[in-house]
Image (cartoon, grey):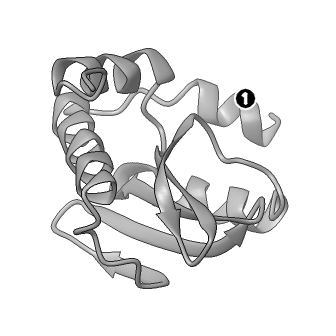
Amino acid sequence: MKIWDKLSQVNLENKEKYMKIYSDIVKKIQNNVFPINVGETEKEDYYIVVEANRMNSYFIHIVPKQVWALFKEMQKKAPNEILGFSVMAGKYNNKEVRVSCFGVQCSFLGKSLFEAGHNKK
């Protein structure tokens, strides 16, 4: 099975939790209050991974522990590709800052942004 097929078959538990984390991080980046520290930060049941140069952008990935091994595999096998749905949330050091939530379908992530009011100017 191809790696992208594996990702498309992921069915995470507690998607709503990760959707909220995703929209919260997007809002913090938009307000310039999210620290952009390259590396991996372990939380209770997910990781925050900040990469400094994926597609010439900073990428902040929310990665549930349930899909951590798949994320690490994709990081290695697709080092110059976007690893799923992401949004550009701001700029830092003259580069775009993009946010993704690995393993959560884009329709859910888009919904979380609209529900959080990110579509309002």
Image coordinates of residue 94 in percent, x first then y, are 62, 71
Which quadrant would residue 115 be assigned to in this image? top left
Image coordinates of residue 120 in percent, x first then y, are 25, 22
Amino acid type of the residue tagged 1 in the rendering: Asp
Image coordinates of residue 40 in percent, x first then y, are 42, 80
Above-or-below relation of 27 to 11: below
Could you tell me how many numbered marks the image carries? 1
Above-or-below relation of 16 to 86: above
| 101 relative position to 15: left or right | right
Q: Nearer the viewer, residue 32 or 20?
A: 32
Above-or-below relation of 91 to 25: below
Which quadrant would residue 36 be assigned to in this image? bottom left
Q: Nearer the viewer, residue 75 or 100?
A: 100
Which quadrant would residue 42 be assigned to in this image? bottom left
| 69 relative position to 117: left or right | right
Residue shown at 35% from the left, 58% from the top:
65
Q: Which residue is mark 1?
A: 5
Q: Residue furthest front?
A: 121
Q: Quadrant of the C terminus?
A: top left
Residue shown at 62% from the left, 38% from the top:
84
Classed neighbour count for the residue bearing mark 1: other residues with Cα under 10 Å, few (<14), some (14–19), many (≥20): few
Q: Nearer the viewer, residue 23 or 73?
A: 23
Image coordinates of residue 59 in percent, x first then y, are 56, 61
Secondary structure under tag 1 reads helix
Q: Nearer the viewer, residue 113 or 92?
A: 92
Residue shown at 59% from the left, 53% from the top:
70
Q: Quadrant of the N terminus?
A: top right
